[in-house]
Image (cartoon, grey):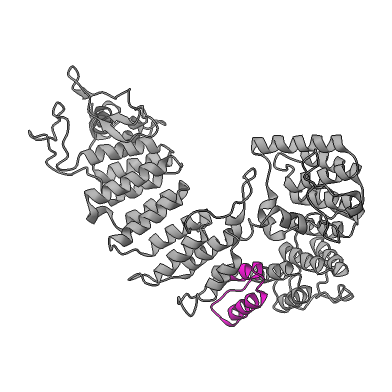
């Protein structure tokens, strides 16, 4: 008895007694609560004096059951207050028990002053009128913040929205503020409900409540995740007129990430050019990286170069190899080998140490510019560096100075070739029909460097083999690809390359078999749509170099197989699908994470309905 009164039951390890909040959590976890609980029930049992749970309505939970678990957890009384209950709600959320956390919140709200209870149910805290004489356990703003922090599933969005609206009506002074709103917006973002998140932000503005930087950060994060670039732009512009709040580098980066995720690079860079003079944003290192990356994707390498120059002139800015890599990525997309080479020489002159992504961008820039000899020179130098051989110099037009001694004071980098770098070079070899060398590189990835081979690498190798009319070898590689690992599965481009090759060479049965395999993967949700990085399927085919030199290739709608085919007179050599290092290094570029699509999702659709855009 004394243990119950002073500390309660002991912990599972028999050590110190459980605190009241921990006992309440343990007691609540023994209460049966259905998903989507919305209210407390007041059904009364005259024999026990305890409210009974209504089994006919799964959206209700018995007040008496929750009351017993809170006031007499684990069979003993406990002294507690509102902060104790807030702790219990937070603890339940950390255990992934949102429904019980919400049930406890409902119990707390039922303790508020003036809340009518069922006339047949009374406890010692009630007066004779059935009203609560005080609000000792009534929820406060910290309660809502704890409850909203528990939400993580799409089904929780409805509860978060309802609690937010009801609480603002019940006590606007306590609940309608930036602290609660930012927690609600963050919860709705986790629930993937960006319209509700924007509505919470709008509710504060409509009532004239000030919205601080945390509210704007939360709503812009939600819009960035949802890739809602138009709404993100509207919210960012509204910051300029917000009293006591002004745009900063974090919010600017989140807004730009929403444009990047939606592939609206030109619109995003047009806004970025006004960050400084119009919005007064002082760029930091992360925002500088985002601006350079998005400018490169938009094809505005001049502005990307200007941004880097400003960062170099600003002593408060920290410029790293990654900063240069962002610019090199833009030059690679623009097939600007000359500027990429000169930037690399500048990187070395500044005593920065190049990494695997530096060489990846150089290989792509040279390959897309048709400078295949220079691409070979870059690869040779990169593999020598990875094997700790000395000598790093800038790349001349013929690569004659590749054996030059390293610049004095420059640390010789040591790294193993990355998956992305190997994939870029395999694609470069594939466009030239050098399939034997491509096979050697892919084999050395496993045997020499111990580097993982992903679907993009295999697609590049398939393109190299098919360009050399090695269909049998390509099918063997396809089988090997499926046995690589659980994470490596054929993609849309894989099937496009193989099916077209089989159709054009008369292997119709194999083509049909591949088509059935593709459909089975699509139905199971395991088929990655790597066409999604292009505006349309035609753009994907064009970028994959599958159109004939004369531009007469077409979809053969009359074909029984239903896939891409062209007459024999229009057939051309195969090229591998363009290896886009930006799409394959999103884990390296934090500002581009939002552009990645999960495997199995349908192709990106055009925007519909009213205007709208979604950690930087």
Q: Could you tell me which residue is drawn at 41 percent across and 36 percent down?
A: 97
Residue 274 drawn at (x, y percent): 51, 76
Q: Among all residues in the image, which is located at the extreme top?
A: 47
Whether residue 92 is in magenta: the answer is: no
Which image quadrant: the N terminus?
top left
Q: Which residue occupies 40% across, 68% down?
A: 238
Taking the magenta stretch, the answer to whether it contains residue 303 is yes
Q: Main secondary structure of the magenta part?
A: helix
Say left or right for 350 vs 443: left
Residue 152: quadrant of the picture? top left
Q: Can you give x and y, in whole percent of width and height, for residue 336 in the image?
A: 76, 73
Q: For the view shown, which residue lies furthest in the bottom direction?
A: 313
| Left or right: where 445 falls relative to 194 | right
Residue 54 appears in which quarter of the rendering?
top left
Would you say residue 469 is visible in this rendering? yes
Across and down, in percent, residue 71 comes to 24, 32
- Image x and y of residue 126, in percent: 12, 35
Numbered range of the magenta stretch: 291-320
Q: Is residue 409 visible?
A: no
**Of residues 274 and 190, which is closer to you in this image?**
274
* Position of 8 relative to 370 (above/below): above
Q: Residue at x 45, y 46 (%)?
A: 191
Check the image and report above or below for 7 versus 599: above
Out of 538 and 410, give the one closest to the viewer.
538
């Amino acid at each position: 008895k004394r243990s119950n009164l002073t500390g309660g039951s002991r912990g599972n390890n028999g050590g110190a007694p459980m605190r009241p909040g921990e006992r309440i959590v343990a007691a609540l976890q023994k209460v049966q609560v259905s998903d989507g609980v919305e209210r407390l029930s007041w059904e009364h049992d005259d024999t026990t004096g305890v409210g009974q749970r209504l089994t006919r309505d799964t959206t209700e939970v018995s007040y008496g059951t929750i009351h017993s678990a809170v006031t007499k957890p684990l069979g003993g009384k406990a002294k507690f207050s509102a902060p104790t209950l807030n702790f219990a709600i937070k603890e339940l959320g950390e255990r992934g028990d949102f429904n019980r956390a919400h049930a406890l919140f409902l119990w707390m709200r039922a303790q508020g002053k003036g809340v009518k209870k069922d006339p047949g149910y009374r406890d010692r805290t009630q007066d004779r009128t059935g009203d609560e004489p005080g609000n000792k356990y009534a929820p406060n703003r910290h309660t809502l913040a704890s409850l909203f922090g528990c939400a993580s599933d799409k089904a929780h969005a409805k509860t978060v929205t309802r609690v937010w609206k009801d609480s603002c009506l019940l006590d606007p002074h306590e609940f309608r503020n930036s602290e609660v709103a930012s927690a609600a917006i963050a919860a709705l973002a986790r629930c993937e409900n960006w319209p509700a998140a924007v509505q919470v932000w709008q509710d504060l503005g409509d009532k004239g409540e000030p919205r601080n930087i945390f509210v704007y950060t939360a709503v812009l994060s939600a819009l960035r995740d949802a890739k809602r670039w138009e709404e993100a732009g509207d919210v960012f512009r509204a910051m300029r007129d917000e009293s006591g709040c002004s745009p900063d580098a974090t919010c600017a980066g989140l807004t730009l990430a929403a444009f990047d995720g939606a592939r609206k690079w030109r619109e995003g860079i047009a806004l970025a050019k006004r960050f400084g003079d119009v919005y007064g944003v002082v760029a930091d290192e992360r925002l500088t990286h985002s601006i350079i990356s998005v400018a490169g994707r938009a094809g505005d390498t001049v502005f990307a170069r200007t941004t880097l120059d400003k960062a170099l002139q600003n002593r408060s800015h920290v410029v790293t190899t990654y900063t240069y890599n962002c610019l090199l990525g833009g030059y690679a997309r623009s097939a600007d080998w000359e500027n990429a080479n000169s930037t690399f020489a500048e990187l070395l002159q500044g005593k920065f140490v190049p990494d695997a992504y530096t060489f990846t961008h150089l290989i792509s820039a040279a390959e897309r510019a048709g400078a295949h000899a220079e691409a070979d020179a870059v690869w040779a130098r990169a593999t020598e560096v990875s094997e700790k051989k000395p000598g790093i110099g800038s790349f001349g037009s013929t690569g004659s100075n590749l054996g030059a001694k390293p610049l004095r004071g420059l640390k010789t980098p040591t790294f193993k070739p990355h998956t992305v770098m190997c994939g870029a070079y395999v694609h470069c070899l594939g466009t030239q029909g050098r399939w034997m060398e491509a096979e050697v590189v892919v084999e050395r990835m496993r045997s020499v460097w111990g580097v993982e081979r992903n679907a993009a690498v295999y697609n590049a190798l398939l393109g190299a083999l098919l360009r050399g009319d090695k269909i049998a070898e390509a099918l063997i590689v396809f089988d090997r690809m499926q046995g690589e690992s659980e994470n490596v599965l054929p993609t849309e481009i894989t099937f496009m390359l193989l099916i077209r090759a089989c159709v054009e060479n008369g292997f119709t049965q194999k083509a049909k078999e591949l088509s059935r395999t593709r459909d089975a993967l699509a139905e199971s949700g395991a088929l990655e749509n790597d066409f999604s990085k292009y505006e349309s399927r035609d753009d994907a085919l064009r970028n994959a170099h599958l159109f004939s030199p004369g531009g007469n290739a077409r979809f053969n709608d009359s074909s029984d197989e239903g896939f891409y085919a062209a007459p024999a007179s229009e057939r051309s050599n195969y090229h591998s699908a363009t290896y886009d290092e930006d799409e394959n290094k999103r884990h390296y570029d934090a500002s581009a994470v939002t552009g990645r699509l999960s495997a199995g999702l349908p192709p990106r659709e055009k925007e519909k309905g009213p205007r709208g855009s979604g950690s930087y």
